[in-house]
């Protein structure tokens, strides 16, 4: 029995750079086996019953394929309305990536159309990319704060245990308060 080649190992998902996004589109265009394996993989995430919500599935597969930060560098047309980031990449240039989205979403939701596909990517994933990125950054920051707070609690509880030390001479506890208890 022949072992199937894992074509997906060529990429480290989620993609982080514009170069990686372009490489993905090229690989889908030039390698049918890669394209089929990617569609199969993403269809396992999105389902293939035809009864799922394409919008929810689109967000799931988008999160698997692309970092939230890289999506902030894209708009549907490549034109930005914001002055802070006037140069954006055109997502429509990634024709084969859009095609994979369509195929996966069509398997998961049998009501899905090319128009809905474009609308989900344009008006959902790309339009709200900055908000989603900022929300994820805040969540990561909150997790770091939580870890720091847990570390502080742990350190304080360890400090309380440092009052009792073992002496080298007799390995008996040397507690500052224990002398007064013995005398009384």
Image (cartoon, rainbow, N blue to C red):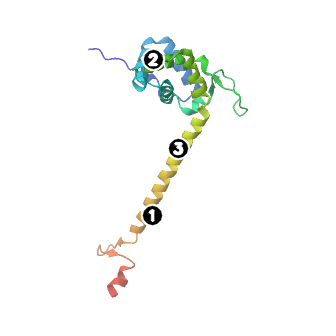
- Mark nearest the camera among 3 and 2 is 2
First-in-chain label (3 vs 1): 3
**At x 35% / y 76%, what residue is drawn?**
174
Label 3 or label 2, whichever comes before in sequence order? 2
Give the side of residue 125 with respect to residue 52, left or right: right
Q: Camera-side residue: 38 or 126? A: 126
Q: Residue at x 42, y 13 (%)?
A: 33
Across and down, in percent, residue 64 comes to 47, 29
Residue denoted by label 3? 139
- Residue 156: give its label: 1
Which image quadrant: the C terminus? bottom left
- Helix, strand or loop at label 3? It is helix
147 is higher (above) or lower (below) than 156: above
The percent position of residue 105, horizontal first and vertical second, equals 47, 20
For disc 2, the neighbor class at 10 Å (few under 14, some 14 to 19, many from 20) is: some
Quadrant for the N terminus, please: top left
Q: Quadrant of residue 179?
A: bottom left
Q: Nearer the viewer, mark 2 or mark 1?
A: 2
- Residue 98 lies, in percent from the top left, at 54, 18
Q: CA distance from mark 3 to mark 2?
A: 34 Å
Asked whether 138 or 128 is in front, the reply is 128
Q: Secondary structure at mark 2?
A: loop
Q: Which residue is mark 2?
A: 110
Q: Which mark is residue 180?
A: none
Residues tagged 2 and 1 counted as in contact (Cβ below 8 A): no
Q: Nearer the viewer, residue 145 or 163?
A: 145
Binning the other alpha carbons within 10 Å of mark 1 as few (below 14), some (14 to 19) or many (20 upward) gives: few
Location of residue 68 in the rendering, given as x and y in whole percent from the top left corner: 55, 33
* Dot 1: element: helix
Compute the Cα span from label 3 to label 1: 26 Å
């Amino acid at each position: 029995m022949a072992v199937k080649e894992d074509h997906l190992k060529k990429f480290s998902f989620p993609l982080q750079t514009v170069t990686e996004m372009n490489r993905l589109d090229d690989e889908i265009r030039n390698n049918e086996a890669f394209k089929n394996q990617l569609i199969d993989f993403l269809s396992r995430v999105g389902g293939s019953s035809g009864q799922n919500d394409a919008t929810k599935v689109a967000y799931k597969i988008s999160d698997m394929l692309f970092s939230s930060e890289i999506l902030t560098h894209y708009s549907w047309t490549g034109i930005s309305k914001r002055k802070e980031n006037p140069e954006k990449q055109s997502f429509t240039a990634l024709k084969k990536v859009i095609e994979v989205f369509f195929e996966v979403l069509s398997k998961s939701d049998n009501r899905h159309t090319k128009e809905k596909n474009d609308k989900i990517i344009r008006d959902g994933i790309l339009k709200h990319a900055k908000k989603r990125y900022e929300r994820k950054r805040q969540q990561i920051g909150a997790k770091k704060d939580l870890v720091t707070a847990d570390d502080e609690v742990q350190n304080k509880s360890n400090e309380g245990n440092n009052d009792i030390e073992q002496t080298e001479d007799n390995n008996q506890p040397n507690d500052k308060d224990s002398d007064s208890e013995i005398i009384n």
